[in-house]
Amino acid sequence: MKTIEASGLTKGYGGRPALSGLSLGVEEGDVFGFLGPNGAGKTTTIRILTGLLEPDSGEARVAGMDVSAHPRAVKRAVGVLPESQGYYGWMTGEEYLSYFADLYGVRNAGRRARKLLDEVGLGERGGSPVGGYSRGMRQRLGIARAMVHSPKILFLDEPSLGLDPKGQREMNDLIRRLGRDEGVTVFLSSHLLSEIEDLCTRFAIVREGRLVAEGDRAELEARLGGGRRLRLEVSDLEKALGFARCVTGLAGVRGEGDALIVELRTDEAAAMLLRLLVMERIEVYSMQRFAPSLEEIFLGLTDGQHAQRESGVAR
Amino acid sequence: MSAPATRDRLSPLAEAGGGSFPGDALLVAKKEVKESIFGVRGSMWAVVSALVLSLMSYLLLTDAELSLLDQSEMLYIVTSLSVGLGMLVTGILAGDSVAGERERSTLESALLSPIRLGSMVAGKVGAVLAGWFLIFAVSAPYILVVGAGSTVALPALIYTFVLGTLCVGGFAALVVGMSSLARSGRGVTLGALAIFLGMAAPTLLGTVLQKSWFGTVYNALSPFAQARLSLDSVIVDKEPLFIQLPHIAALVGFAALAVAFLAFAARRISFEGGE
């Protein structure tokens, strides 16, 4: 069942389009990675889906509710960590969470605040003013605030921003557990592709306000050639590069260190390349098939030429 | 960090959303009062007001020329000063109330919660009014000391509170409304100060100009002038309350218009600023 659905969303700021007919769907319980370069419309999408902005056209449904028609009900159903949120520096962490717990009508707000502070690792600093917190501590406090009313859907806009590697790992563990153990649907926008590569069950890639691709990892790989990539360690890379460029059926050829990397359009192309290398007396020491990283998929799909080919394709 | 158990802790009240309109407004007001009245700013305004009132009272009671004024005239000056200080302080607090949160990026989190915009601005106006109550509390001893021995001291105190609350309340609603639509808290505060000076300007007009058509129109349009004229009428001229009805009606009208503007502005609050 889709718990987040957007259909044909458009939004412009002073004539400049931020979203141009964006459509996507997120299944309940998914940890959904929402990726795109700066200015792609990620934050605008999150603001529309959380009832903070009205789209110019299109429809957004969250938790089964039309966001434009029932913004308060949607706000009750979701927790949000905005990309750059401010904090009341004069409040202690506990006061801050209690205040928001009260706004959401959570019973025993103080107890809930203390519990959350412990869970995000701020238990010992809960009595200190937020003004003295580090960036990472504030980010954890923001996550705790987003969860203060125990939402079924979490929108996290760059949650790892400002966290050190240990903090990033802890944040990822938390998100993973929320999705896996608690069944919370997580809509995660991030630039740290390597961080969320293993975290998300599905992904959407946006560029210039349009959806470029959506699906699980395998589906995205398929959009880039289905993971048909070969890494060959050869005796003479320069010669091998030259011959490889003559082989039809290869989508791309490049050198990486001492290895030749080729993208295959067909399996026959791999056989042809091998035959050619052997004929030309170039030793092949090893050959490995590998899948592109999420970063490569992202760059491939958001690259100008590819995006142009894909423009208008929603799914 | 460990994953919080999210489902089982959702209370029935949370399922139903935030609290009631007055409940949410009270929450916001309590937070704002703690920040602006019980904080450094509140203490600073209390001290500044006390200093200004002390200086004025001292001059009224000891200055060779000012001490020649009738006691009721002195009382009128102190009560007018109290309302003026109230407007000044509330204008500054109100200017920062919404636009300041927008500038500090704290507004987005508040708007992401299910609180009604009406509750939010009502809470903010309530907190700003608490600033007036603080100024009035500081002023009260001065009013009672300057009016000591006269029969009008206590009525003047009560009447100052009533008129001041109408005048300052309307002004607070107006400026919180402006702050709801603006991007810059500092800009709204400067605008509020300019409006306050405009309202106080009739006090600077000479007697002849005050009695001219220009002075009459200016006084009629200025809530602060209406409050001063009514205080003058009650404290100095000892005129009965029914004579004050036009002044009170003007202040009620101003407050009603300001609240209507606030309601209009509240519906347009966005984290980005005015539409």
Image: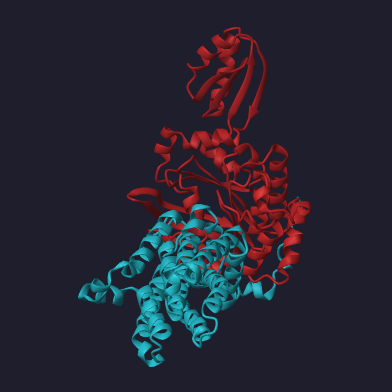
Chain colours: A red, B cyan
Query: Residue A221, percent across and down?
Result: 56, 38
- Image quarter hosting the N terminus of chain A: bottom right
Q: Nearer the viewer, residue A292 or B77?
A: B77
A171 on left or right of B147 = right
Residue located at (50% from left, 68% from top): B62
Q: Residue at x 68, y 50 (%)?
A: A140
At 59% from the left and 28% from the top, the residue drawn is A229
Q: Is residue A236 placed above or below A141 in the rendered structure? A: above
Count of all numbered marks drawn on residues in the image:
0
Q: Residue at x 68, y 75 (%)?
A: B12
Q: Of B215 and A39, which appears nearest the observer?
A: B215
The foreground one among A222 and A211 is: A211
> In the rendering, at what x and y percent does residue A115 appear?
76, 60
Image position of A163 with respect to A90: above or below: above
Residue extending furthest toward the top: A281
Closer to the camera in the image, B54 or B189: B54
Q: Is residue B271 above or below residue A171?
A: below
Outermost residue toward the left? B213
Quarter of the figure with residue B236: bottom left
- Viewed as shown, does residue A124 lie left or right of A3? right
- Identify the image quadrant of residue B230: bottom left
| Above or below B92: residue B240 | below
Tell me where residue B200 appears, x and y as whole percent. 36, 68
> Which image quadrant is residue A181 in?
bottom right
In the displayed image of the protein, which residue is found farthest to the front?
B64
On the question of residue A24 being in view, the answer is: no
Q: Position of residue A202 (x, y in %)?
A: 60, 48
Q: Does the image show residue B14? A: yes
